[in-house]
Image (tube, rainbow, N blue to C red):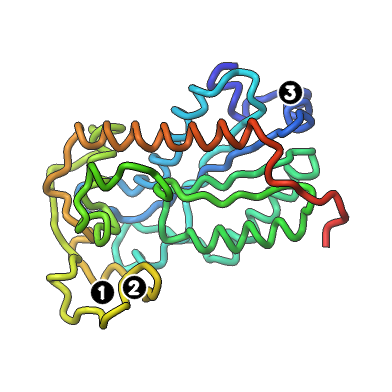
């Protein structure tokens, strides 16, 4: 199966029907955003990461694996970046409704799993809500909301603890990954901005921007450039290593998923 044959929208109608009816049929829907990523990265950063990492993983999977992908949903939920020109954001309700509508249709075709493959940290919780709601409506299809960077082993050996903990947006990791995947889209600036030592007030003990006790931060609260992190040590070499870790991680996870019948689903009526 060529890469193009993995693209659901390029199938002919009989092929789409056959794909959906295969045992363990799985559809992957990449999600990104159109939002500012500082002066050095393109607005499409998250969507490009989701698209290219997923394509690389699908290219490695055996031809017999019953998995296809939908076109990347490029515009997402990005209100935290709304004070910076270039950012486009859809209402949360609209994204939830869209996922519910598309998900219901692919479930009615017979697909057994829908993976929401998301690369934008600002919509993790939103896609989890949409997934749970869709799953309740279509008991016959498993819905798996995933985040590109979650659970990837070995990142701490590549990126500093400070950057892993506080480099939330357009910092070293994202700038490096873009230098590897699409270097022609990377500008020359390398800001360090939005880090804890530059905050007017530090979080009280136990609280943080993200984590166990987070706050609903806005980028303009923290950063003048739109960067939250330190992009100065970014490199293509680091980007290549990050890409390899990401691709290996998701190849392993999808291989395991496609080799199983997990998660089991109900075939009862939708509620």
Q: Is residue 183 above or below residue 12?
A: below
For marks 3 and 2, give the CA distance.
Answer: 45 Å
Q: Is residue 113 above or below residue 207?
A: above
The residue lying at 31 percent from left, 55 percent from top is 36
Asked if marks 2 and 1 touch (Cβ < 8 Å), the reply is yes
Local crowd size for mark 2, using a 10 Å CA cut-off: few (<14), some (14–19), many (≥20): few
Q: Is residue 82 left or right of residue 223?
A: right
Q: Is residue 104 above or below residue 257?
A: below
Question: Which residue is under mark 3?
Answer: 15
Local crowd size for mark 1, using a 10 Å CA cut-off: few (<14), some (14–19), many (≥20): few
State the quadrant of the N terminus: top right
Q: Is residue 95 left or right of residue 226?
A: right
Work out whether mark 3 precedes mark 2 in sequence or the reverse, and give the earlier one. 3
- The disc placed on residue 221 is 1
The quarter of the picture where residue 128 lies is bottom right
For marks 3 and 1, give the CA distance.
Answer: 50 Å
Question: Which residue is under mark 2?
Answer: 217
The residue lying at 41 percent from left, 33 percent from top is 247
For marks 2 and 1, give the CA distance.
Answer: 7 Å
The residue lying at 77 percent from left, 25 percent from top is 18
């Amino acid at each position: 199966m060529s890469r193009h044959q993995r693209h659901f929208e390029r199938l002919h109608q009989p092929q789409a029907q056959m794909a959906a009816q295969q045992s363990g049929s799985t559809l992957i829907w990449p999600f990104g955003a159109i939002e500012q990523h500082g002066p050095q990265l393109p607005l499409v950063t998250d969507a490009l990461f989701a698209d290219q990492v997923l394509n690389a993983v699908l290219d490695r999977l055996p031809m017999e694996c019953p998995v296809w992908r939908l076109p990347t949903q490029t515009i997402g939920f990005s209100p935290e970046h709304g004070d910076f020109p270039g950012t486009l954001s859809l209402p949360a309700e609209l994204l939830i409704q869209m996922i519910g509508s598309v998900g219901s249709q692919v479930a009615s075709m017979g697909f057994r799993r829908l993976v929401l493959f998301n690369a934008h940290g600002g919509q993790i919780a939103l896609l989890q809500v949409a997934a749970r709601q869709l799953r309740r409506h279509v008991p016959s299809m498993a819905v798996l909301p995933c985040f590109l960077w979650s659970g990837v082993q070995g990142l701490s050996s590549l990126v500093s603890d400070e950057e892993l903990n506080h480099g939330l947006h357009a910092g070293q990791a994202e700038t490096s990954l873009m230098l590897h995947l699409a270097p022609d889209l990377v500008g020359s600036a390398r800001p360090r901005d939005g880090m804890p030592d530059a905050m007017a007030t530090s979080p009280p003990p136990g609280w943080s921007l993200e984590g166990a006790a987070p706050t609903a931060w806005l980028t303009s609260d923290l950063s003048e450039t739109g960067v939250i992190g330190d992009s100065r040590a970014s490199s293509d070499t680091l980007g290549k290593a990050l890409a390899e870790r990401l691709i290996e991680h998701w190849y392993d996870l999808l291989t395991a998923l496609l080799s199983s019948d997990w998660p089991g689903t109900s075939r009862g009526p939708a509620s």
